Image: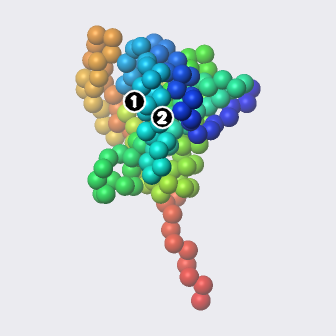
Amino acid sequence: MTITVRRARVDDAAAIAAIMDEPSVYAGLMQMPHASVEAHRARLTDSLAPGKGDLLLVAERDGKVVGSSGMHPAGWSPRRRHVMSIGISVLREAQGQGVGTALMQAMCDYADGWAGVLRLELSVYVDNPGALALYRKFGFEVEGRHRGYALRDGEYVDAFSMARFHPRPPAIAAAAP
């Protein structure tokens, strides 16, 4: 089956909320149970506004949204303009089938070739081996461990901070003589 990655649209809110409302998905993210279509619609509307630095993508298979990803400025400081943070979610039934790889490839291509991003950052729970393998495949390295990072189903869980640097940072071409 072919996976198509495209920019998210406001009318994807229900599909994204459905992905985020799966217990196996929100348990691996900072999402809460009972995802709100309205909240996702508002987030999409805000992130897609002109001048925003966010990149929101969805992955489709057979016309159905099976994954989503986001790349967001790491903060407001001009000193961190070279950094973006990312996140990915994949519908349980589509996990392990190349959806995360397609989304990650699209985000890395955008960051490396078009957005001037030197450093991509993310957080991932230490007990999420599939996500860790995906991130490592794209050059992310663990930079630290956060103890008791987030509450998940009544327990505090640890997370790794991971980052990836641009593999070939842009340079100015030599001037012709």
Q: For residue 64, what is the image quadrant?
A: top right
> How far from the left and from the top, in percent, is residue 16?
52, 25
Judged by depth in the image, the label closer to the viewer, 2 or 1, is 2
Report the coloring of the rendering. Answer: rainbow
Tell which residue pokes out farthest to the right in this image.
Answer: 1
Tell which residue pokes out farthest to the bottom in this image.
Answer: 177
* Mark 2 nearby-residue class (10 Å; few <14, some 14–19, many ≥20): some
* Label disc, if present, on residue 83 of the rendered structure: none
Towards the viewer: 121 or 51: 51
**What kind of residue is marked 2?**
Leu
Tell which residue pokes out farthest to the left in this image.
Answer: 148
Q: Residue at x 37, y 18 (%)?
A: 32
> How far from the left and from the top, in percent, is residue 9?
57, 35
Q: For residue 38, what is the image quadrant?
A: top left
Image quadrant occupied by the N terminus = top right
Q: Secondary structure at mark 1?
A: strand
Report the side of 136 relative to 81 (left or right).
Answer: right
* Label disc, if present, on residue 124 of the rendered structure: 1
Q: Residue at x 54, y 56 (%)?
A: 114
3D distance between C-alphas at marks 2 and 1:
23 Å
* Label disc, if present, on residue 44 of the rendered structure: 2
Callouts 2 and 1 close, C-beta under 8 Å: no
In this view, 20 is above or below 139: above
In this view, 156 is above or below 165: above
Image quadrant occupied by the C terminus = bottom right
Towards the viewer: 105 or 61: 61
